[in-house]
Image: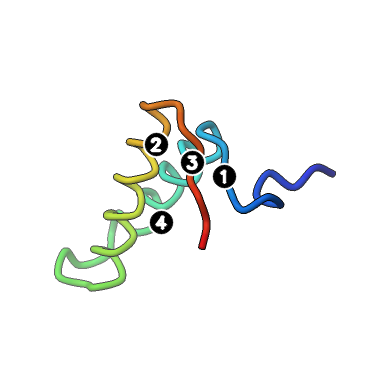
């Protein structure tokens, strides 16, 4: 099985999938939950990466 992040990047299509799942997971959490805020921030960035068709670098 190929590992899309093996070179330190996630491709745009994977970012879109992960962003959607993050949003689903935290949907019912309280809006003031710091983990929810961080998850939504990450999801927003991943969606932007997808829109720009750029890979997301991992550090």
Instruction: Check whether the beta carbons of the residues at disc 1 and disc 3 lie within 8 A of each other.
Output: yes
Q: Secondary structure at mark 3?
A: helix
For the residues labelled 3 and 4, the Cα–Cα distance comes to 15 Å
Query: Which class describes the residues within 10 Å of circle 4: few (<14), some (14-19), or many (20+)?
Result: few
Nearer the N terminus, badge 1 or badge 4?
Answer: 1
- Are discs 3 and 4 less than 8 Å apart at CB? no
Q: Give the SS element for disc 2.
A: helix
| Mark 2 or 4: the one toward you | 2
Q: Closer to the camera, 52 or 15?
A: 52
The dot on residue 49 is 2
Q: Earlier in the sequence, mark 3 or mark 4?
A: 3
Determine which residue is flagged by label 3: 15
Query: Do the residues bearing badges 1 and 2 touch, measured as CB atoms within 8 Å?
Result: yes
Q: Which mark is residue 10?
A: 1
| Relative image position of residue 18 (x, y in whole percent) | 49, 46
Q: CA distance from mark 1 to mark 2?
A: 10 Å
Mark 1 element type? strand
């Amino acid at each position: 099985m190929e590992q899309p992040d093996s070179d330190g990047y996630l491709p745009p299509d994977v970012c879109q999938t992960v962003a959607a799942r993050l949003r689903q997971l935290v949907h019912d959490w309280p809006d003031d939950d710091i983990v929810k805020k961080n998850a939504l921030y990450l999801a927003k960035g991943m969606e932007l990466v997808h829109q720009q068709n750029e890979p997301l670098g991992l550090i």
